Image (cartoon, rainbow, N blue to C red):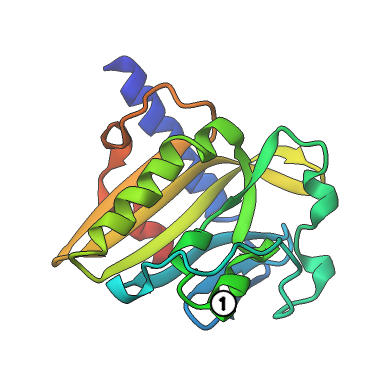
């Protein structure tokens, strides 16, 4: 119980501090999703889109990460930030959600749509949540917001997120998740559920 209270106290404190740090925020609109992006820290705040059953296809091959031409390349991360890193290029909006269309797949593989992510977390519980979300989309249209809460440590020129979060809206309700950006201590995504109202504060 004390551990859980400490976690949420730390989370809320980070929210309070971070609310004053974003300085040069732009909205990047792609065909199937949009990104709230801070060009000062060169990283995404959150992404937003609606996932439908019609989008659930893996027919198109995954392409390589590249500069997002919507903004200047020097205002976003690049390959050198991740070269030799222990962190993955962690998608906020996952490539697999857009592979039904080759054009939207390419738009998902941009540096504005990723941040440094613990590789065991990225390939473990985070991947499990993405699969869970796609399974839900067989039954509901899902509005999805995914974001980062940044700390002070850096990987290359980029801040390393302390937390990743995802907010889902479907069937008239919101469901929220927040994960520390570390090797997972639990494999169950339900252990990372949070009050959706906490996350709604990040997008309003």
| SS category of the residue bearing label 1 | helix
Total labels: the figure holds 1
The quadrant the N terminus occupies is: top left
Q: Quadrant of residue 61?
A: bottom right
Q: Nearer the viewer, residue 3 or 170?
A: 170
Q: Looking at this view, name the residue that lies furthest to the top.
A: 2
Q: Is residue 129 left or right of residue 39?
A: left
Q: Quadrant of residue 141?
A: bottom left
Q: Nearer the viewer, residue 60 or 11?
A: 60
Residue displayed at 46% across by 26% down: 184
Disc 1 crowd, CA 10 A, few/some/many (<14, 14-19, 20+): some
Percent from the top left, x then y, of residue 140? 20, 67
Name above or below for residue 158 compared with residue 78.
above
**Would you say residue 81 is visible in this rendering?**
yes
Q: Which residue is mark 1?
A: 102
Percent from the top left, x then y, of residue 16? 48, 47
Residue displayed at 24% across by 53% down: 175
Percent from the top left, x then y, of residue 44? 60, 61
Percent from the top left, x then y, of residue 97? 44, 64
The quadrant the C terminus occupies is: bottom left
């Amino acid at each position: 119980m004390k551990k859980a209270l400490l976690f949420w106290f730390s989370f809320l404190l980070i929210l309070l501090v971070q609310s004053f740090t974003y300085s040069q925020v732009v909205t990047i609109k792609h065909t199937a999703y949009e990104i709230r992006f801070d060009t000062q820290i060169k990283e995404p705040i959150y992404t937003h889109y609606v996932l439908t059953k019609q989008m659930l296809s893996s027919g198109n091959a995954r392409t390589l990460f590249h500069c997002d031409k919507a903004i200047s390349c020097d205002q976003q991360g690049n390959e050198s930030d991740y070269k030799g890193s222990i962190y993955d290029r962690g998608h906020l909006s996952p490539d697999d959600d857009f592979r039904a269309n080759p054009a939207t797949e390419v738009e998902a593989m941009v540096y504005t749509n990723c941040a440094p992510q613990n590789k065991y977390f990225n390939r473990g519980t985070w991947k499990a949540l993405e699969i869970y979300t796609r399974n839900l989309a067989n039954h509901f249209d899902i509005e999805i917001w995914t974001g980062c809460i940044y700390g002070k440590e850096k990987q290359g020129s980029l801040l390393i997120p302390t937390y990743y979060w995802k907010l889902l809206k479907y069937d008239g309700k919101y469901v929220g998740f927040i994960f520390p950006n570390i090797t997972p201590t639990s494999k169950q995504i339900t252990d990372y559920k949070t009050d959706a109202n906490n996350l709604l504060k990040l997008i309003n």
